[in-house]
Amino acid sequence: MKALIIGATGATGKDLVTQLLTDDTYSEVHCFVRKPLALTHPKLHAHVVNFDTPEAWADLLYGEVAFSCLGTTLAIAGSKEAQWRVDYDYQYAFAQQCKANEVPTFALISAAGATAQSKLFYNRMKGQLEDAVKALGFSCLLIFQPSILIRSNSDRGIENFTVKAFKFLNKLGILKRYRPMPTEILAEKMLSAVYNSPKGTFTFVLDKIFEI
């Protein structure tokens, strides 16, 4: 199989690429990135692209499965408009071209609470992206809505504090549906879902991802 991925330099994306490269099911792994990857591997093909001009690299988007792991934070993006461009525009353009090139399976990382009707900007953006990708009509669409992600060696102080707080509450039996998920586990479950899901659209929410 040939896999396509955007967001390969993010925490989940890195873990996903590592697992794809060690999985004999995949003969080629094509990453689309802004800057060259330090990682090298016989199966890895890293394409440095401009996400603002997806039509320039659309002819590279052929394969059996595509993974959309791209995302940023409002703090890093600097504005809602900039975050929308990364979290919605870039991912939708990727999905749109994959569908046009008849990629049968598409896996999208969304977020817990994603809905187009949300009053919260982030959840509304993610929900609108889900709806837009659903409308493309992939043979198999897999949407993942994890809770807080545990990133290896994370230097985000607020994120680390939140993870510790949720783990403490989970031990007390509180908010167990929202238990934090290591990024390597999310990557593992995404691959498992690709193997095991029939045709159709499937949304995996919160702790249900652990059950895949």
Image: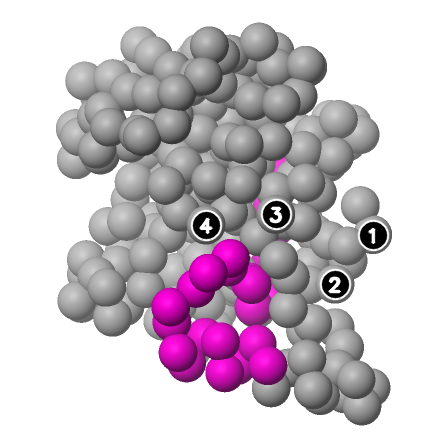
**Residue 63 makes an appearance in the image:** no
Residue 176: percent from left, percent from top: 76, 77
Q: Amino acid at mark 3?
A: Glu
Res. 83 image quadrant: bottom left
- Above or below residue 59? Residue 39 is below
Q: Is residue 183 left or right of residue 157?
A: right
Q: Quadrant of the N terminus?
A: top right
Real-space CA distance between mark 2 and mark 4, rounded to the nearest whole angstrom: 19 Å
Reading the image, the residue beneath label 4 is: 11
- Above or below residue 148? Residue 15 is above
Is mark 1 in CB contact (under 8 Å) with mark 2? yes
Numbered badge on residue 207: 2
| Residue lying at 49% horizontally and 76% vertically, measured from the top left | 160
Residue 80: percent from left, percent from top: 23, 66
Q: Amino acid at mark 4?
A: Ala
Real-space CA distance between mark 3 and mark 2, rounded to the nearest whole angstrom: 15 Å
Real-space CA distance between mark 4 and mark 1, rounded to the nearest whole angstrom: 21 Å
Q: Is residue 130 left or right of residue 77?
A: right
Alpha-carbon neighbours of circle 3 within 10 Å: few (<14), some, or many (≥20)? many
Alpha-carbon neighbours of circle 2 within 10 Å: few (<14), some, or many (≥20)? some
Region in magenta: 141-164
Front residue (pair 99, 143): 143
Res. 60 image quadrant: top left
Reading the image, the residue beneath label 1 is: 211
Q: Is residue 13 left or right of residue 181?
A: left
Alpha-carbon neighbours of circle 1 within 10 Å: few (<14), some, or many (≥20)? few
Mark 1 element type: helix
Reading the image, the residue beneath label 3 is: 184
Is mark 4 in CB contact (under 8 Å) with mark 1? no
For marks 3 and 2, the one nearer the N-term is: 3
For marks 4 and 3, the one nearer the N-term is: 4
For marks 3 and 1, the one nearer the N-term is: 3
